[in-house]
Structure formats: C-alpha cells, structure tokens
Amino acid sequence: MTDFVLILIGAALADNFVLARMLGVEPWLDAPPRLAPAAARALVATLTLTLAAAAGWIVERALLQPLQAAFLRPFALILLAAWLAVAVARLLHRATPALATAAELRPALLGVDGAVLAAALLAATRPLDFVGAVALGLGAGLGFGLVLLMFAAMRARLAAAPVPAPFRGAPIALVTAALLALAFLGFAGMG
C-alpha cells in the first residue's frame, strides 16, 4: 500500500508529466479558461493515462517478454496508445455524451501529446508490479489534471489582469508555465 501511495504521489508531483517531462503540453496550453471543461478534460486524461499504464504493463509482461520480442515494444505501444485514445473517446461519446461534450473531446486530445504513450512505456519498462503500473498511470493522470486545473484557473485570472500588450496570449502562458514548473520543482526530492 505504501508503494502505491509513493508511486502515485511521485508521478503526480515530483515526476509530473507536463512540468517535468514536457508531455501533454499542447492540450494543456489549449486549456479552456473555465474550470468545468478543464475538470472534464482532467477526468478523461486521468482515465486514459491509467488505462494506458495498465495496458502497457500487460502487453509487456503477457506478450512481449514471453515471446522475447522487446524490439517490438515501441511499435506495440504506439498502436496501443493510438487505439486506446480512439476507444476511450468513442466509449465516452456513447456512455456519457455530456462529459464528452464538456471536455470538448477529440481522439487527438486524448493522445495527450505523447503522454499516453509515455505512461504505457514507463509502466512497461520500470520494475513495477501491476498495482504499481496502475499507480503510475493514476498519478500521471492526477498530476496532469492538477496542472490543467491550475492553469485554467490562472488563465481566467490573467484574462482580467492588466497584462502588458507584448505579454498577452502565448507569452504570459509560457511565463505562467515556467512559474508552475518552478513550483513543482520543490517536489523533486519526493520521486
């Protein structure tokens, strides 16, 4: 149980996919300035990253290792990540159309700019058991969601702030991202 919690907190804070690894940056910078769509996106990303880590671990342990086919790992995990992004998008559109509409879902968004592939790859290559792989995916999703919600809240405040003209838009977003990365750097000793 303590390993689960340590892996979860480490993946969410110390080894954050967005701020430490620069994965999932495009959907994060494209975050809506309202909290409701950002929360829906965070929920969907957490689900997708958790499933990707679990599926990557299963593919590695049940398929690639017994066949001694480690050379197929990149190809297999790329296919897995692409299939998973499309499958989760379709499933959410059918099961909960309101959540899919609120999150402004599209399969490219669920790819989370390589974060799904990274979650599957890290779960497959790290010496983890299945529960550890699930903790890694869940922590990555929670960390992505935390950063997404923080950035959406800051973006709403920045829209009303007296930002100098040259810094409006993307420049202030990048400055905000840098400050968030510095804040999360304080968790570096936890990983």
Image: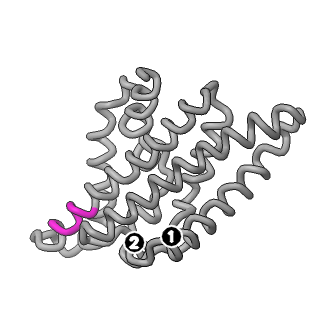
Give SS at disc 1: helix
Placement of 99 over or under 25, stated as above or below: below
Q: Nearer the viewer, residue 81 or 31?
A: 81
Please provide the residue range marked out in magenta: 152-157
Q: Amino acid at mark 1?
A: Leu
Check disc 2: other Cα within 10 Å, few if <14, some if 14-19, many if 20+. some
Numbered disc 2: secondary structure: helix
Residue 39: image location, x then y, percent: 32, 62
Look at 62% across and 66% down and name the residue there: 87
The secondary structure that most of the magenta stretch takes on is helix
Number of callouts: 2
Q: Is residue 124 magenta?
A: no
Q: Amino acid at mark 2?
A: Leu
Residue highlighted by disc 2: 99
Badge 1 is on which residue?
A: 92
| Image location (x, y in percent) of residue 114 | 58, 55
* Residue 31 shown left or right of residue 72 in the figure: left
Front residue of 14/51: it is 51
| Up/down of 128 relative to 116, above or below | above
Quadrant where the image shows the C terminus: top left
Q: Quadrant of residue 11?
A: top left
Residues at marks 2 and 1, CA–CA distance in whole angstroms? 7 Å
Residue 99, quarter of picture: bottom left
